[in-house]
Amino acid sequence: MKGAVKSITIRGFKSIRNLEGLKLANLNVVIGANGAGKSNLVQVFQMLRSMTLEGFQKFIGGNGGADSFLHNGPKHTEEIYLELEFESGSPASEGSNFYKCQLTPTVSETFLVEEYRRHLSDGAWRSYGSPSQESRLREMRNEAVHSGEGKGVGYFVYESISSWVVYHFHDTGPLSPMRRSEIVEDNQVLRHDASNIAPFLRELRSAHHTHYQEILNAIRLVLPFFDDFLLDIVKQGEAEKTKLTWSQKGSDFPMQPYHLSDGSLRFICLVTALLQPKPPSTIVIDEPELGLHPEAIRILGELIRDASNRTQLIVATQSPLLIDQFSIEDIVVVNREGGQSTFQRLELEDFDKWLDNYSVGELWTKNVIKAGTNHE
């Protein structure tokens, strides 16, 4: 799949001391006990995404400073090393694109970033330049465009990483972003917290009606009383805004965002993310099952499977019911052993006989799939 991550190596990042060449497919369902390291894998994708926005140091500072990212602190870990292999972004360029970076801590608890890139056909890594406070991913992409060199490795690496979205729909309280008004112009990309879900849906209704209708149909499977979104425009000063107003079947009363339960609102956001017409190259979702009815979790699993035909998905979950919707080869198990996180993609041949009598989720709850609490 164009721009997808084929493998990732992580060294020295939080609980991940040494993860070598984890193979990633179109669908990757990451399971493990609390504290095993699932969220740390998710945060690697968040951090790399921040580097394409030239907001790397802000991300590091906002999450405790450089020392908090180093495995067991700076006395034990001198640097963080990341290496990614991407599917080629060009039909004319067969093979993989590679990117790696080394993050070295400074006395001021920031990082210096040193970056390299290469194509499968190249013999050596090419440097992005001397170590710097911010990533040069965007700079190198822009230079390639303006110089007329064509869309090389640097261009495609930037395009892939900058497209990633790590969705977090955990905050569904009364003041959550998705319950509030947003300017109608913020409608091109669904934001990580769905703060612009109302203008985004309004744009889909206008420009991508088939996808909009698919979203409505999926919502009605879980909320059968749901009719449609209203999404009326309201003038607030100089700005035109809209919010997630909706209607029930058989009623013309305009329902407000606060009429939606937390689980209902979260499901609407998940459906919209998974059925959007132009998905990111990679979508990462942490614990999407939170607050959902068992039937909603089953339908969510179907939507995730379907979306993996269009984009790469990395889903971290603790729900046996959710993993019941997937094949054993889709599962990546995270365990904590010897003070560090280990990752293993499961293979069918190791569980073939078990699957004649048990589901994937049952194998987990019975500890046949060993992804439970480990007392070190």
Image: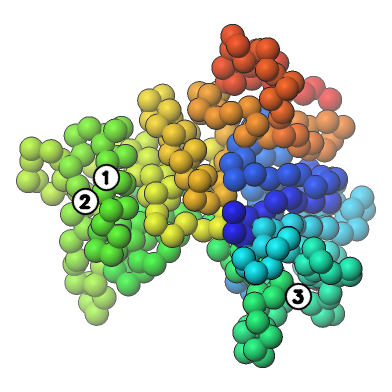
Q: Nearer the viewer, residue 79 or 100?
A: 100
> Which one is earlier in the sequence, the residue at label 2 or at label 1?
1
Q: Is residue 372 left or right of residue 288?
A: right
Residue tagged 1: 216
Residue 217 in which image quadrant: top left
Tell me the distance, in whole angstroms, between the alpha carbons under discs 2 and 1. 9 Å
Residue at x-position 49% and y-position 38%: 305
Residue 31 in picture, x, y percent from top left: 64, 32
Query: Vertical placement of 84 versus 117: above or below?
Result: above
Label 2 environment density (alpha carbons within 10 Å; few <14, some 14–19, many ≥20): some
> What residue is shown with label 2?
229
The amino acid marked with disc number 2 is Phe
> Residue type at mark 3?
Gln
Q: Secondary structure at mark 3?
A: loop
The secondary element bearing badge 2 is classed as: strand
Total numbered circles? 3
Q: Residue 230 sits in which quadrant? A: bottom left
Do callouts 3 and 2 mark residues in contact (Cβ within 8 Å)?
A: no
Q: CA distance from mark 3 to mark 1?
A: 45 Å
Residue situated furthest top in the rendering: 357
The answer to whether mark 2 and mark 1 are in CB contact below 8 A is yes
Residue at position x 26%, y 67% in the image: 241
Does residue 244 appear to the left or right of 140 in the view shown?
left
